[in-house]
Structures are given as structure tokens and as C-alpha cells.
Image (cartoon, grey):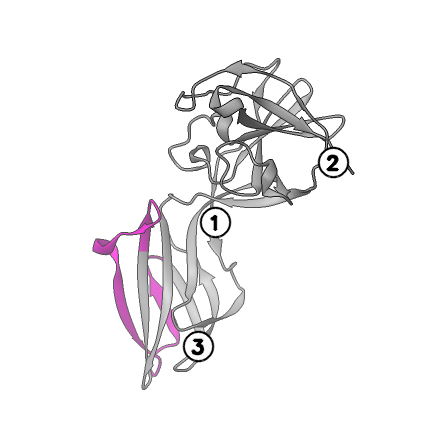
Amino acid sequence: MKIRAYIITFASISMTACISVPTATNYKSLLTEPVAYSIPELSSVNESQVGDNMLTQGKRRNVEAIELKNSSYRPQSGTSNIYIKMAESDGYFWYADSNSPIFTDAGGSATNGVTIKKHKESGNLCPFQITNGGYSAGYNCYEGVEYVEIPNYELYSIDSFQQSLMYNGKIGSKINIAYREYSDNKVRSAFSNEVEYDMSESNIIAYKGAVLKVLEYSNTKIKYEVIKNFN
């Protein structure tokens, strides 16, 4: 099918200008607040290799999203093919790049440069694009763009505070477990630690409120049940 493009909105701008989402009729946010998560689930039995996270806790949202099948239809500043439904207005649903700062702990507003609006009736996508050598911009709408609807997408807060336990192998009957804390996607070295547990005394690992029951262990992997998450 031949792709036909037409311009919905048009404005003269500078490439360096700060562009905010335009006023739209009855525009309202659809974003929910992030909630705490823990992986794996309570009572689940799991296996981890040496160096793998055994238990991780942080924040995430369950959201609706679309995945572009062709990166040519990204908005001007788009960096991924996953776009999160963030708002709606008369006639359109609005989506923002999943890598946008709007989805971090700091929050804020998504600029036009990372947004796509989708026509409610036709399903046509309208990414924000800069044209004419950078002197004009608008939401260019395209027919026949291939994308996939994702009704339940798990969006993780990449800069939120996170905790994890990692398996570091064994020496004799003792296993080594590393604890890590992350903030802004970086390890908080001052809060990291490594602890040895003697399996001949007990097969229970407990740290920072998290409790795991060790079922099997070797030099390369560990099998365990999650009893309790981090506090």
C-alpha cells in the first residue's frame, strides 16, 4: 500500500526551541502512579545463575502502549519503538516515548518531540516531526503505519530506588550473596554488601527484610523459594 502523509498542524519553530504539548480540546492525562514491584513473586520457586539477580524490587506502571514496526515513523526526538499511552483528547489518544523523562521519578511533561497522537476512529498515527530544514513542525499523520497494540505493558521506572540480591557462588557449604541498591540506574556503592550463609546451619537467607529458602545450590546456580520481599 502506498503511504499517504498529510499535515495536521503546522508551526514555524527553531530546531533548538523548547516545544510543549499543544493545548487540545478536553485533553486529560491517563497516567497512573507507579507502584512497587518485586520479582520473582512470593512463594515462587526459581533458579538463578552466578551473577544473576535472585530478587529485585523497584517501581513500575502497567500501561497501554503501541510498538512501531518501522522506526521511520518515530517522532522527531524519539529513541525507541515503544510508545506509552499518556493522555486523550477529543479525537485522539496521545503517546510518549517509553524512554521519556516523564516516566522517571522526576516526572514532568512530555514535549512534542517525543509524542505521537493516534486518531481514535481511523487508528492513523501522527508523530511530531520537524520539516523544511528545521524551520517548521507539526503532527504528520500517516495511513497504513504498521504497529502493535500492547494492552498491558510493564513500564519500569529506570531511575527509581531499587534493591536486589545476587548469587555469587559457593565455597564448601557456604554460599555468597551480594546485596545491591540502585538509584538513577546507578549502584549505590556505600549501601552494597556481600554476605556468606552457611547452609549446614540453615537453608534460609534473610537480608533487609527479604527471606529466601535455598532448595539447591552449586558453583554455577542456585534454586530457591521466595518467602518474603524486601521491607
Label located before the other in sequence (2 or 1): 1
- Residue at the far front in the pictured view: 133
Tell me which amino acid carries mark 1: Tyr
Residue 63 seen in this snapshot: no
Task: Write down the residue under mark 1.
Answer: 37
Label located before the other in sequence (1 or 3): 1
Comparing labels 2 and 1, the label whose residue is closer to the camera: 2
- Residue at 38% x, 43% y is 160
State the separation of the CA atoms marked 2 and 1: 37 Å
Circle on res. 184: none
Q: Is mark 2 on a helix, strand or loop?
A: loop
Depth check: give the residue in front, 82 or 139: 139
- Residue at 33% x, 51% y is 182
Q: How crowded is mark 1: few (under 14 residues within 10 Å), some or many (20 or more)?
A: some
Task: Write down the residue under mark 2.
Answer: 144
Depth check: give the residue in front, 116 or 160: 116
Q: What element carries label 1?
A: strand
- Residue at 40% x, 63% y is 211
Task: Write down the residue under mark 3.
Answer: 221
The percent position of residue 189, horizontal first and vertical second, equals 23, 55
- Residue at 60% x, 23% y is 139
Tell me which amino acid carries mark 2: Gly
The percent position of residue 92, horizontal first and vertical second, equals 66, 23
Label located before the other in sequence (3 or 2): 2
The percent position of residue 222, horizontal first and vertical second, equals 44, 75
State the separation of the CA atoms marked 1 and 3: 24 Å
Q: In this view, does 72 lie to the left or right of 185?
A: right
Comparing labels 1 and 3, the label whose residue is closer to the camera: 3
Residue 175 seen in this snapshot: yes
Residue numbers of the magenta segment:
181-209
